[in-house]
Image (cartoon, grey):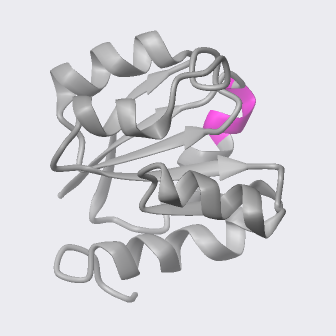
Amino acid sequence: MLKVLLVDPNPYFIRSLRSILSGLPELTVVGEACSLAEGRVKAQTLQPDLVLVDARTPGLADGHRIRHLKQWLPAGKIIVLTVFDAAPYRAALVADGADECLSKETLAEDLLPTIVRLFPQEVSNG
């Protein structure tokens, strides 16, 4: 069972994420956070396999980098979610340590296939 941590300042979006993730029974959401500071504590405590984090999360958007998340979660994977779909912006997030960067606009179509690709041994292709 893959443990997932959701980090997004918008509780309504977190509900949407939970709904999308319900399509993979091999996943369980172990925690939610609305800021980078809260996400750090939960990542260290819960040791999730996957963190889904909004690029504009308070703390992360204020100069902290994805690589800081990797320090707190060296064995886990990070998918950054963003409304900014420009290729250079997404490439910079991946270069900074994100395992993937997905647009929120196409998240319903892209998230589950991306998780299957990142965790082929743990998640079936449905």
Q: Position of residue 2 (x, y in %)?
A: 23, 56
Q: Is residue 14 magenta?
A: yes
| Count of numbered marks | 0
Residue 58, picture quadrant: top right
**In magenta segment, residue 104:** no
Q: Position of residue 90 (x, y in %)?
A: 68, 60
Question: Is residue 90 found left or right of 40 in the rendered image?
Answer: right
**Residue 45 % position (x, y):** 17, 20
Q: Is residue 45 above or below residue 23?
A: above
Question: Is 31 displayed left or right of 93 in the figure?
Answer: left
For the stretch drawn in magenta, the main secondary structure is helix
Q: Nearer the viewer, residue 19 or 89?
A: 89
Identify the residue shown where x is 24% and y is 29%. Answer: 72
Q: Image point 27% across, 65% down: which residue?
A: 26
x, y percent for residue 74: 18, 43
Residue 30 visible in the current orientation: no
Determine the image quadrant of residue 85.
Answer: bottom right
Residue 7 appears left or right of 24: right
Give the left or right position of residue 105, taking residue 82 as reference. Answer: right
Q: Which of the 4 image quarters holds residue 43?
A: top left
Residue range corresponding to the magenta coloring: 11-15
- Tell me the quarter of the image containing the N terminus: bottom left
